[in-house]
Image: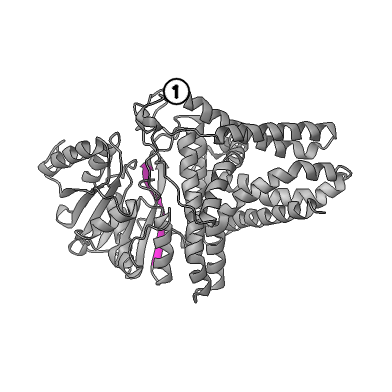
Amino acid sequence: MALLVPYFIVMVILAFYGIHRYQLVWLYYRNKRNEQKSNEPPMRFTPEELPFITVQLPIYNEQYVIDRLIDACCRMDYPRDRYEIQVLDDSTDETTEVAAGIVARYAQGTSGLPPQPIQYIHRTNRYGYKAGALENGLKTSKGDLVAIFDADFVPPETWLMDVVHHFAEPKVGMVQTRWTHLNRNYSFLTQVEAILLDGHFVLEHGGRSRAGVFFNFNGTAGMWKRAAIDEAGGWEHDTLTEDTDLSYRAQLKGWKFKYLQDVECPAELPIEMTAFKTQQARWAKGLIQVAKKSLPTILKSDIDKHQKLEAWYHLTANISYPLMIVLSTLLMPAMIIRSWQGPLQMILIDLPLFLASTASVSTFYLVSQKELFPKTWWKTFLYVPFLMSLGVGLTITNTKAVLEALFGIKTAFARTPKYRVEKKGEKSQAKKYRKRLGIIPWIELAIGCYFAATVYYAISTENYFTVPFLLLFVLGYWYTGLLSLFQGLFERRGSRGDEIHEKPYPVGI
């Protein structure tokens, strides 16, 4: 009982979060009539009424991608007398010289463009990091609206005009657009990452926005009304996800958020497993920090119960990672204790929990791909086992991040490197930004071996029903561990790639 009670408690909690994924799919389709489209804003500005827009580009050591970003922003279609670009540079390497030179060229006119309204703002104290850079830029900005793009994004020319008219409604405070992926087909890993992000943008943002509940700005590829930022208290830097923090504070003040699924903004995916795990751990830790900070206020507010429940699920979802560790620990002992059970017990107990907690993941991502790629979505079935196993493989790094957030532990932050690698076969020259490995990959390999032994036990006891489930754990831990180690073999010892940029809060994606 001491083992089985916590085992089933964990399974039931994970099942509730799995059922919530089904609910998001249901909300997405049930409220399809509420979908917001770029060409159908309820109100529009006349050409004379178009508001002044400030485009903020917060960067930190981005020398390989900054020229691509600035060129794209300077080519966006918007009246130049109502438009300005701020390059907010907190860099500590050669990026400062690169960015300043690029800004000077575009300010004078280059690449077939007339002089552009662009300015370069460099900070040396880096107080508040990304949130601090954005707040510092607002001090000198002219815009009634503020668009934000991280360094690895390439906004299309029509982006501003696609978004701006939705702010003709007085209470619209933020509009988020959908990320797409410049290097989706670079590797198997980037293809899986793309599907994971597609699920977030299509079903989480789509389902929540259509249902009229709170959802968050993603830190980039979105536009804010300056008044909404100010009324919500401005950018704060006490969490890793300052974007989600500001989003909830603004919506609690009554500002309305919109999500435009049909407006795309391409970006670069992490091409290395260590970079991907660092990124995911930051998001996991940041959401738990926001949950600690904002949930008490949200639950005491006068918003309706559905909005409160959805906020709870959103902000606490990453608690599933520590629960997965508990489940992993108890799985083999529970199998040994329950060795007496037959097919009937599995159908009545294990199958419903499996369908709720695990099958919901595959359903979630299959539906998102069907929405985006109706002719080729069926190919996603090939990726489903790897989607699920990759989620399992992230449990070690994300559990560490979640526990740090719960206990208020501030840690050094390792940035997600941008390599400007888009096509298969291209080699990255940005070795200096590569991460250290640490002990985590070896722990992942050891846990994978533990589950391999569990698979052997399941087969020897003819418990075949659990074998596919257990293989996901083996594949997940071995894939993340081995790929991290394999990519780390090419790291140059003693190079600047071994450095971790010491900062407790993130800059960039």
**Would residue 324 be counted in the magenta stretch?**
no
Q: Is residue 13 left or right of residue 234?
A: right
Foreground residue among 489 and 280: 489
In this view of the protein, can residue 113 be seen by the observer?
no
Q: Quadrant of the C terminus?
A: top left
Q: Nearer the viewer, residue 493 or 383?
A: 493
Please identify the quadrant where the N terminus is shown: bottom right
Q: In which image quadrant can residue 414 be found?
A: top left
Judged from this view, the residue extending furthest toward the bottom is: 302
Under circle 1, the secondary element is loop
The image quarter containing residue 444 is top right
> Left of 257 or right of it: where is 145?
left
Question: Quick one: 399 or 144, which is closer to the camera?
Answer: 399
Task: Verify whether residue 264 appears in magenta.
Answer: yes
Question: Which residue: 33% across, 51% down?
Answer: 130
Number of callouts: 1
Q: Is residue 272 left or right of residue 1?
A: left
As shown in the figure, which amino acid type bears the numbered disc 1? Phe
Percent coordinates x, y for residue 440 in the rendering: 55, 36
Instruction: State which region is magenta.
Output: 256-266
Residue where numbered disc 1 is placed: 490
Q: How is the image coloured?
A: one colour
Q: Where residue 378 sits in the image (x, y, percent)?
A: 58, 38
Give above or below for 27 relative to 196: below
Residue 334, position as x, y percentages in the image: 79, 45
Residue for point 82% across, 37% down: 463
Q: Main secondary structure of the magenta part?
A: strand
Nearer the observer, 494 or 1:
494
Query: Is 22 rendered above or below residue 325?
Result: below
